[in-house]
Amino acid sequence: MLDDEFTNNRLELEQVLVRQFRVLQEMNTLTRTERDALLSDPEQVLRIVEDKEAMLDSLGLLEDQCRNIVQELSLGLGLRTENTSIRQLLPFLKPEDASRIKNLSEGVSGLASQTRELNRANQALAITKLDWLKATQDFLISIFLPDAGYRSPKGGVRHTESTGLGVEFRA
């Protein structure tokens, strides 16, 4: 009975790792799509960000599931450590099972790292685009605002501040 439970937990761990891997692959693809949208289709970015948030929620649930299964496996093996990891379980598994789980775990870690780097690059791109937009906005507003100390030729009134001709000055 105990062996069946252990086998079921091991199989469930593999399934959770496979689901994590697939979600991360989707996240990676979506992050690449986000980069294209940042460059050419800003209206699509909001939808992509919402999709990514849903994927992150899913990944969080899968991570919790994985942690619980690893905990159950470690208890079944009699390991009494507070933070058991998949790597600590590998020596107790059959070599072929250990190899599959290790490969899946490394694949998940690798994809997570790759996706994190893509997100950082997208963030840098978005910040650059926002800086460019702010500089363009400042330039356009400066065209409409008269210089400080400007004197109107009609009334000789000195303007020290202008309303901006209806142009809002916000970022």
Image: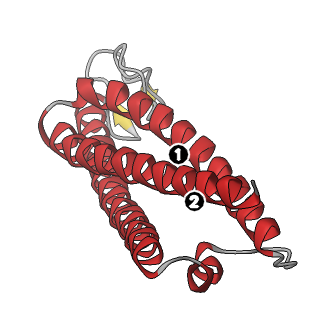
* Discs 2/1, front: 2
Where, quadrant-wise, is the C terminus in this rendering?
top left
On screen, residue 42 versus residue 61, left or right, reads: left
The disc, 2 or 1, on the residue closer to the chain's N-terminal end is 2
Work out whether 96 lies above or below 43: below
Q: Which type of secondary structure does the marked residue at label 1 adopt? A: helix
Protein image colouring: secondary structure
Q: Depth check: 104 or 97 in front?
A: 97
> Badge 2: how crowded within 10 Å, few (<14), some, or many (20+)?
many
Work out whether 169 lies above or below 36: above
Residue located farthest toward the bottom when viewing the structure as drawn: 91
Q: Is residue 137 visible?
A: yes
x and y percentages locating residue 74 in the rendered image: 75, 70
Q: Which residue is mark 2?
A: 10
Residue located farthest toward the left when viewing the structure as drawn: 40
Q: Residue at x 38, y 23 (%)?
A: 164
x and y percentages locating residue 142 in the rendered image: 29, 38
On screen, residue 106 versus residue 133, left or right, reads: right
Q: Is residue 160 visible?
A: no
Q: Residue at x 33, y 66 (%)?
A: 114
Q: Depth check: 21 or 146 in front?
A: 21
Q: Which type of secondary structure does the marked residue at label 2 adopt? A: helix
Q: Residue at x 37, y 73 (%)?
A: 103
Q: Amino acid at mark 1?
A: Leu
Q: Which residue is mark 1?
A: 59
CA gap, disc 2 to disc 1?
19 Å
Instruction: Name which quarter of the figure residue 69 lies in.
Output: bottom right
> Badge 1: how crowded within 10 Å, few (<14), some, or many (20+)?
some
x and y percentages locating residue 140 in the rendered image: 23, 34
x and y percentages locating residue 32 in the rendered image: 21, 48
Work out whether 95 lies above or below 100: below
Q: Amino acid at mark 2?
A: Arg
